[in-house]
Amino acid sequence: MLTSANETLDIDLLILPETNLILIASVIEPLRGANRISGAELYRWRLFTPDGSPAETTSQIPVPASSGFRSTSDTAPLFVLASYNWQRSATQALKMQLSQTARHRSMVAGIESGTWLLAEASLLDNVSAAVHWEDFDDFALAYPQVRAVKDRFVIDGKRITTAGSLPTVDLMLEIIRRRQGYSLALEVSRLFIYEPASGQNAVELSPSTAGLRMRDPRVAQAIRLMEDHIEQPLLLARLARRVGVSARHLQALFQDSIGAPPHVHYLALRLNAARRKVIETKDSFADIAAATGFNSASAFSRSYRASFSESPSGTRRRLRGRATAAAEPT
């Protein structure tokens, strides 16, 4: 699940009553975004509830389920989602089902309060687990055999845990990054734009910084400069001077803030801009290469294939095939 791959990944979601709608969306929407942006079915998901009835969300918007959850030998990753009053669903039967199916699953994830249910089913013994900050002390006291940590999400062997809705988005982006690469994860992150309240000190967000948690305003400034210089990329030394730091310091700031060096992020921005042109225009590949800062169409094609596992012509050919199939009468 967490290694480079382009085949479809099936994920099962067990949704407990009184789960926040935004928590469900935090798992599904990044996967849907990855499918839409890539133009391929990279991810599929099935929704289960303990009894098969629609999931009762806190928003009073029911979410249909495929069926009731049962212990099976399925190997697909299982995500257990819960927000409030998870104890009401933590029956001995459900805990037994989780324990049995966990023997076969490639990964089991506790999403927000789902962490509690996994701990209750003894599925987090001797592993590290992320817990919502409000519940941290109570969780650590209740389950001393679990190493509770104050992180947004934790991947520890075959167990994953998250500390809330936005940390779950972070997790899904990390899964996409590990499977399909930094470029796609970056483009998916841009779908989730959060703007702080306007004011004199508000940090300006551009499409390239949306969805990224900027720990340093110099990183945000550098990314905006990258966005403004797609056609003629700035050298790292010049970019650093514009920001007011050394090249080495800028590299350290990027690594600390977004977990990637400047050249990786810059190349992802350019390739994503190129991919949009490949999909949305009929421009020649030579023109697209020039517009996104590549020296030649061949250099562009090599970088494109390395990032997206297909050539620019392959992308257009595949999407034409899908459009033709959709237009054919059934």
Image: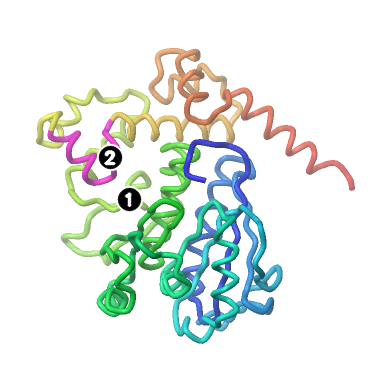
Q: Is the Cβ of the residue at disc 2 closer than 8 Å to that at disc 1?
A: yes
Instruction: Identify the mark at residue 223; answer none if there is no mark.
Output: 2
Crowd tier of the residue under label 1, counting other residues whose Cα lies within 10 Å: few below 14, some 14–19, many 20 or above: some
Q: How far apart are labels 2 and 1 at the CA level? A: 11 Å
Q: Residue at x 41, y 54 (%)?
A: 171
Q: Which mark is residue 33?
A: none
Can residue 59 be spotted in the picture? Answer: no
Q: Residue at x 42, y 69 (%)?
A: 115
Percent coordinates x, y for residue 247 in the rendering: 15, 29
Residue placed most toward the observer, 247 or 252: 252
Q: In this picture, is 75 found above or below 113?
A: above
Q: Quadrant of residue 273?
A: top left
Is residue 261 in the magenta section? yes
Q: Residue 105 versus residue 165: which sits nearer the camera? A: 105
Q: Secondary structure at mark 1?
A: loop
Residue nearest the viewer, comparing 215 with 158: 158
Residue 114, magenta (yes or no): no
Q: Which residue is mark 1?
A: 212
Q: Quadrant of residue 279?
A: top right
Q: Quadrant of residue 182?
A: top left
Q: Which sits in the foreground, 207 or 177? A: 177
Task: Read off the magenta span.
Answer: 249-262
Mark 2 or mark 1, whichever is nearer to me: 1
Dot 2 or dot 1: first in sequence order is 1
Residue 234 image position (x, y, % from top left): 26, 25
Q: Residue at x 47, y 44 (%)?
A: 2
Type of amino acid at the residue the image marks with label 2? Ile
Secondary structure under the numbered disc 2 in the rendered image: helix
What residue type is disc 1 on? Leu
> In the rendered image, is residue 250 in sight?
yes
Residue drawn 40% across and 62% down? 161
Instruction: Please state if 97 lies on the left or on the right of 202 as rendered.
Output: right
